[in-house]
Amino acid sequence: MLPVRSRLRRASEIREVGRSGVRRSRIGLSVAVLVGPDDRSPRATVVVNKKVGGAVVRNRLRRQVRHGLIRIWDEIPPGAQIVVRAQAAARELDPADLDEHLVGAVRSATASRRAVR
């Protein structure tokens, strides 16, 4: 689980990352990353579309995505803000494939020079 200080919680912050950040998409996932100049620890949020399914299905998918983020947390640059959006296609992926797509999208977005504000 992500610590409270490592979560993006304000809608305005989530919108800013979505608008200004570098976006990368994979099957069922869309990742936006915005890296700031500060040295704070990275912050992230996971947004799951209601088309994915009921609350149980959405929460399970949200936990799987957060677990994938935690696995690569040390690779994420300081000051990064990450928004992961999961669509209905993500529910069909097995956890290993979901994790692979997530890691690939996050690494690709953070490697981009445009990710820096």
Image (tube, rainbow, N blue to C red):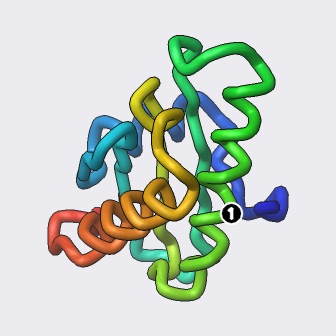
Residue at 58% x, 87% y: name it.
74
Residue 42 in the figure: left or right of residue 84: right
Give percent across and percent down for residue 4. 83, 57
Q: Which residue is mark 1?
A: 67
Question: With 32 as the anchor, is 115 left or right in this view?
Answer: left
Q: Which residue is at the front of the view, 84 or 37? A: 84
Residue 58: x, y in percent? Answer: 68, 28
At 47% across and 44% down in the image, what residue appears?
Answer: 93
Residue at 44 percent of width and 59 percent of height: 97
| Residue 89, percent from left and from top | 40, 30
Residue 25 lies left or right of residue 54; in this view the side is left
Figure quadrant of the N terminus: bottom right
Quarter of the image holding residue 111? bottom left
- Compared to residue 91, the image places residue 81 above or below, namely below
Question: Among all residues in the image, which is located at the extreme bottom?
Answer: 74
Decide: is 35 above or below 48.
below
Mark 1 crowdedness (10 Å alpha carbons): few <14, some 14-19, many ≥20 = some
Looking at the rendered structure, the secondary structure element under dot 1 is helix
Relative to 98, does residue 67 appear above or below in the rendering?
below
Q: Name the amino acid type tagged 1.
A: His
